[in-house]
Image: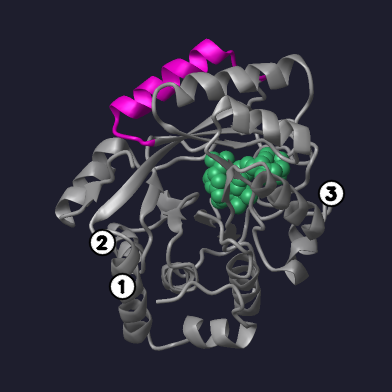
Amino acid sequence: MQIRHNWTREEIRAIFNSPLPDLIFQAQSIHREFHPPEEVQLCRLLSIKTGACPEDCAYCSQSAHYKTGVARQKLMNPADVLESAKRAKADGATRFCMGAAWRDVPEGREFDSVLEMVRSVAALDLEVCCTLGMLTDSQAARLKEAGLTAYNHNLDTSPEFYGHIITTRVYEDRLQTIARVRKAGITVCCGGILGIGESEEDRIGLLHQLATLDPHPESVPINVLARVEGTPLANTPDLDPLVMVRAIATARILMPASRVRLSGGRHKLSREAVALCFLAGANSIFTGEKLLTTPNPSVDKDMALLDDLGMKAMARA
Ligand code: SAM
Ligand code: DTB
Ligand code: SF4
């Protein structure tokens, strides 16, 4: 199986809409060529700076534009972050992701603290990921030097639908930040969110954007909306979990070597739906009862599910 970056929307539409047995079979076949099929990477997420974000992402609990009841919290201190990373490691996580509700990364004392956090988490021999908003080239280079493995920056949806969800920045800004991360030699974590009122064509458009990045993002998080009271999307109907399964299988086929992460909103999916997502090629999850501000299944529940499926946590690469 050759890795391709020249996928067309037509090809992707055909894959996405193929009969489910064919779609899963193709995704599984490719998955097994590139990854051990029973292994799932466990990742842990920590919100190091919460709320008061100047961006207006319509799904987000942390935007200052909406009254969501999420408590604001200034940047955490590095010692507390390190404690949290140690707990994550003890729970079996091999990747630790720190999220800050910034539009872009501030220079000075706060950025120095983030660099210290990255250094100390990297020293635990965990993969270290940050998601901090837009970056300059020099910040990307300093994060790389501090030991950052990956930077998360999502395209979220198709270019056509993007403006319906976020008005405070444009798709091109996202692509530029992703290119900066790549240039600094940091791996790219880039995916999207489903269940935000997008059409099927928007899902295909998102997958097309991701699959034509060259190289592909090493990590592709697929989120399903966790509805948050007070946001414009608070009353959006639930997504059919089979759409999630199709999107994951399509991502697996398009980007064979990438880790596909079943991310936000997983607590809304049944065990059976999560199992289908694994069959479709998802090989990474967040564990721990909280993501940034929304709930996630408990570690015990996740371990029991993996056990029942005869699957296991991936060891550190
Ligand atoms: N502030 C950072 C930025 O600008 O990229 C990233 C943090 S944000 C929480 C990362 C991603 O989480 C978003 O791009 C979106 O895909 C997902 N996300 C945010 N809120 C969500 C929600 N309520 N439910 C599901 N996924 C969500
Ligand atoms: C991503 O795509 N999903 C993660 C991570 N990147 C930062 C976040 C998911 C949940 C966010 C919603 C919350 O908990 O507030
Ligand atoms: Fe801010 Fe990120 Fe939330 Fe958008 S998703 S409002 S950028 S914290």
Q: To which residue does mark 1 refer?
A: 28
Q: Residues within 10 Å of mark 1 (few under 14, many from 20)?
A: many
> Residue, x 59% and y 54% (percent of image)?
190
Q: Residues within 10 Å of mark 3 (few under 14, many from 20)?
A: few
- Numbered circle sitting on residue 168: 3
Q: For the residues carrying marks 1 and 3, which lies nearer the camera in this image?
A: 1
Q: Position of residue 133 (x, y in %)?
A: 71, 40
Q: CA distance from mark 1 to mark 2?
A: 8 Å
Please name the amino acid that badge 1 sits on. Gln
What's drawn in magenta, residue-wise? 74-94
Q: For the residues carrying marks 3 and 2, which lies nearer the camera in this image?
A: 2
Q: Earlier in the sequence, mark 1 or mark 3?
A: 1
Q: Is residue 36 above or below residue 286?
A: below
Q: To which residue does mark 2 refer?
A: 37
Q: Are marks 1 and 2 in contact (CB under 8 Å)?
A: yes
Name the chief secondary structure element in magenta.
Answer: helix
Please name the amino acid that badge 3 sits on. Thr
